[in-house]
Amino acid sequence: MARGPDGKGGGAGFSLADQLFNAQSIGDLARDYAVLGGFDASKFQSDALGGMEGRGLLERLDWIADCIQGQLPQDFGQMADALQRAMPAPLDPDLTDDDFGRFIHAVPGILAVRHGLEDHRERALDLIYEATKRFSMEFYIRPFLNRWPEETLARLEGWAKDPNYHVRRLVSEGTRPKLPWAKNIDLDPAVPLRFLEQLHADPTRYVTRSVANHMNDLSKIMPDEVVARLSDWQGQERQQAKEMDWITRHALRTAVKRGERGALDLLGYSAGDVTAKLSLPDSVKIGEAVQIEVALSAPQDLPVMVDYRLRFARPTGTAEKVFKLKTGKVKAGQELRLSKAHKLKGDASTFKLHPGHHGITVQVNGLDVAEGGFEVLPES
């Protein structure tokens, strides 16, 4: 489940902020900085832990940076040197995915922005370059893109070819137009496409996942360009076919939910003459599952991507959310039967269910083909 920058989510009583910043993690960070002469690790631990209460995840990071900054040289060049000396070993460069690093190692990025953005751009970017090998710096490169766009893009041009895949990923992730939690960037969204042109062929999934997420962001801004670019990449054959298929599907996931014709055609789900029968129960109680039964038929063989839109009753109207049903193939003259039990959770953290009339619309290859409704009853 996605969690916001306050660090909350995942059920009652859970705090991601507490999980990430606690006595153990602060102790680990204290040991990192203890290599610096004159750094009082005990004072840092006491100060940092004493100020955690009431702060969200990103606020805790800023607070930790405050506590470290107070014991570092105030000259930025000397500060940056100290931050680099205190860095742990780089993340394993031989891995290819899911090695994000630890949030406690975001401090160099925070201080690079605070003290290097205006007057020490090049040294600050050097610091971010080293830091991103320990913890992703996508939040902290963005102020430099806003303040020094051409100079920062020139750096990213080289970083896109770097031997370290964490550095290459930063180029894609840091320039995403809709990066979660992050501050906006003023950059024309089309500008980073020149980086994605290279990075889509990267051998590591960590990088290609970022490229796909970046393209998914762009699909909300320039959908036709995204489809055209993905089609071109497929034709270039610079990426393995299986990975390129994955990138394409992941990049177009939001466009598919919107039923955009170009995205569906690229994925091989062309519009066709499909007949659908939808069966639903008359009523379902909150906490139970609504059984969705769909029978599809077509006069020709047809690959199908089947989604359904669930319309929720609300006190002031309705809300709608798209869910996946299945992908498959309808054989000419034969029914393809699909089913799914959709649990109507009464304790979902993202929305609250209300009793009343709910509706379901079945969508096949982007086209609405059947709809029906049922009553949601209160829990027993």
Image: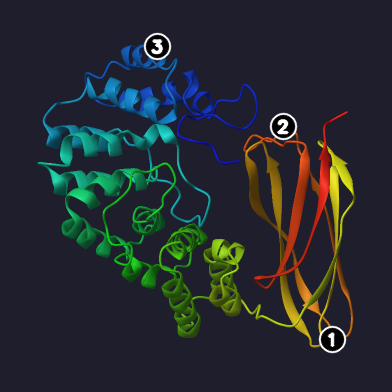
Residue nearer the viewer, 265 or 173: 265
Lateral position of residue 254 relative to residue 62, left or right: right
Label 3 to label 2: alpha-carbon separation: 34 Å
Q: Is residue 380 visible?
A: yes
Q: Secondary structure at mark 3?
A: helix
Residue 182 x/y as whole percent: 38, 43
The answer to whether residue 137 shows anywhere in this view is no
What residue type is disc 2 on?
A: Asp
Which label's residue is closer to the chain start, 3 or 1? 3
Q: Position of residue 60 (x, y in %)?
A: 39, 25
Mark 3–mark 1 Cα distance, whole angstroms, equals 69 Å
Is disc 3 in contact with disc 2, using a CB cutoff of under 8 Å?
no
- Residue that appears at 41% across and 15% down: 49
The image quadrant where one finds the N terminus is: top right
Tell me which label, 3 or 2, sits earlier in the chain.
3
Q: Residues within 10 Å of mark 2 (few under 14, many from 20)?
A: few
In front here: 335 or 151?
335
| Residue depicted at 81% across the width and 36% down the height | 286
Residue type pointed to by label 3? Gly
Q: Quadrant of residue 302?
A: bottom right
Q: Which residue is mark 2?
A: 347
Q: Secondary structure at mark 2?
A: loop
Q: Earlier in the sequence, mark 1 or mark 2?
A: 1
> Which residue was labeled with disc 3?
50
Residue that carries the numbered disc 1 in the rendered image: 332
